[in-house]
Image (cartoon, helix red, strand yellow):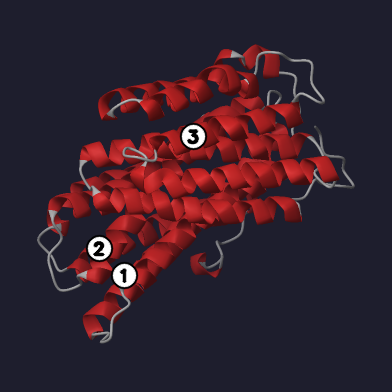
């Protein structure tokens, strides 16, 4: 679908209401990760998150391709939302007794999406049909098996789902999407994830006696969340819209930058949220290594992912963000040896300096082109 010069496709009220389910889903994934900070816990949470993410992506792509302001599509999207809500309810015990509920609801929502999509397309093999025939049944089968086999089948399903757009790239090369709608939708999901950071911080800081240490931890955590927001929305969101509008093959932007890279952007925000919750809950205790790794590693992945997306969109490295990602990882040993508030402030310093350096570089480039001195950096 292409956008005319006079009318751009906008996000509908139906989509915004649908997103409320995923506010809860992100909280549930955070809870799963909160219970197990190990590498195995991080991996298990990622495997559970991918089908939830892919459900949202599929609904968003369908909404981009057609107008949802009709009875059938509204009811269909609400039904997908209900199945997603059941999946979210199952997340904390997805590797226990609720695995079948999780897998069964994924298959059910993919069937609903396929019914909605195949009213208007004759394409037989696409992400929607593969989910109904292959990955949905894999999740159901995994829900019936023990932990090891369950994780293996769910991993296979996640890999297959994410691989389908790449495998059918040629079939999608001529499809046109509303370039303004998709960046707005994916940006809204980033807002949902950042909102989880604030909720996690506020919830963990609830106590009968808020000490200065608690308040300092909340303030530092909030500033870090603001800095993460700045990294995405001040320059990257507009760059994404520009790249998508200019691309001759839009799926070459949608697939790697939206469908794939945003898994890591949102996943890293979730890990940071879990780490910040630990900081605000225990502001006077030094961080143990797993929590420090969630914070430093989450910030590093978040920054490094922008390096990947910038290369995919413009074939130029995002040097400032890559350097900042390396600094975050290098600071990991220091985070375990300083008070939690200081540890968060170190990450704030890295991300804020990355924002300032990037803004200055952009302003300097504009100055060289215009032949005028650069304006102050901090007024964006």
Q: Is residue 107 left or right of residue 14?
A: left
The residue tagged 2 is 278
Q: Is residue 214 left or right of residue 2?
A: left
The residue tagged 3 is 51
Counting from the top left corner in percent of width and height, residue 242 is at: 67, 41
Secondary element at image label 2 = helix
- Whether residues under marks 2 and 1 lie with C-beta atoms below 8 angstroms apart, the answer is yes
Residue 204's label in the rendered image is: 1
Few, some or many residues within 10 Å of mark 1 (<14, 14–19, 20+): some
Spatial CA distance of label 3 from label 2 is: 27 Å
Counting from the top left corner in percent of width and height, residue 191 is at: 53, 57
Q: Upstream in the sequence, badge 3 or badge 2?
A: 3
Write the residue at 50% across / 40% down: 52
Q: Upstream in the sequence, badge 2 or badge 1?
A: 1
Counting from the top left corner in percent of width and height, residue 202 is at: 38, 72
Counting from the top left corner in percent of width and height, residue 22 is at: 54, 51
Write the residue at 19% across / 70% down: 282
- Whether residues under marks 1 and 3 lie with C-beta atoms below 8 angstroms apart, the answer is no
């Amino acid at each position: 679908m292409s956008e005319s010069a006079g009318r751009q496709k906008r996000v509908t009220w139906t989509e915004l209401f649908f997103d409320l389910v995923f506010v809860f889903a992100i909280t549930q994934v955070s809870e799963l990760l909160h219970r197990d900070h190990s590498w195995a816990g991080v991996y298990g949470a990622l495997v559970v998150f991918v089908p939830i993410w892919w459900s949202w992506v599929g609904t968003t792509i369908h909404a981009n391709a057609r107008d949802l302001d009709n009875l059938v599509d509204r009811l269909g999207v609400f039904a997908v939302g209900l199945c997603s809500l059941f999946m979210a309810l199952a997340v904390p015990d997805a590797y226990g007794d609720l695995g079948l509920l999780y897998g069964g609801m994924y298959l059910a929502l993919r069937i609903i999406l396929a019914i909605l999509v195949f009213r208007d397309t004759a394409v037989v093999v696409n992400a929607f049909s593969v989910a109904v025939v292959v990955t949905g049944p894999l999740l159901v089968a995994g829900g019936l098996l023990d932990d090891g086999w369950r994780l293996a089948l769910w991993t296979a399903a996640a890999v297959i789902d994410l691989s389908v757009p790449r495998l059918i790239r040629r079939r999608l090369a001529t499809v046109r999407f509303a370039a303004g709608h998709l960046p707005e939708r994916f940006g809204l999901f980033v807002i949902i994830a950042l909102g989880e950071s604030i909720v996690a911080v506020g919830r963990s800081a609830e106590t009968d006696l808020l000490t200065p240490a608690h308040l300092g931890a909340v303030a530092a955590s909030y500033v870090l969340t603001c800095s993460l927001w700045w990294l995405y929305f001040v320059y990257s969101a507009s760059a994404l819209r520009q790249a998508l509008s200019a691309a001759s093959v839009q799926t070459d932007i949608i697939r790697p930058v939206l469908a794939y890279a945003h898994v890591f952007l949102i996943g890293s925000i979730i890990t940071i949220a879990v780490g910040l919750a630990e900081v605000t809950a225990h502001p006077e205790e030094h961080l143990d290594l797993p929590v420090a790794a969630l914070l430093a590693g989450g910030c590093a992945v978040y920054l490094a992912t922008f390096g990947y997306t910038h290369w995919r969109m413009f074939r130029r490295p995002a040097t400032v963000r890559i350097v900042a990602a390396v600094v975050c990882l290098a600071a990991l040993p220091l985070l375990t040896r300083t008070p939690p508030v200081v540890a968060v402030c170190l990450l704030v310093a890295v991300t804020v300096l990355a924002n300032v350096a990037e803004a200055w570089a952009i302003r300097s480039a504009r100055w060289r082109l215009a032949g005028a001195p650069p304006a102050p950096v901090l007024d964006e």
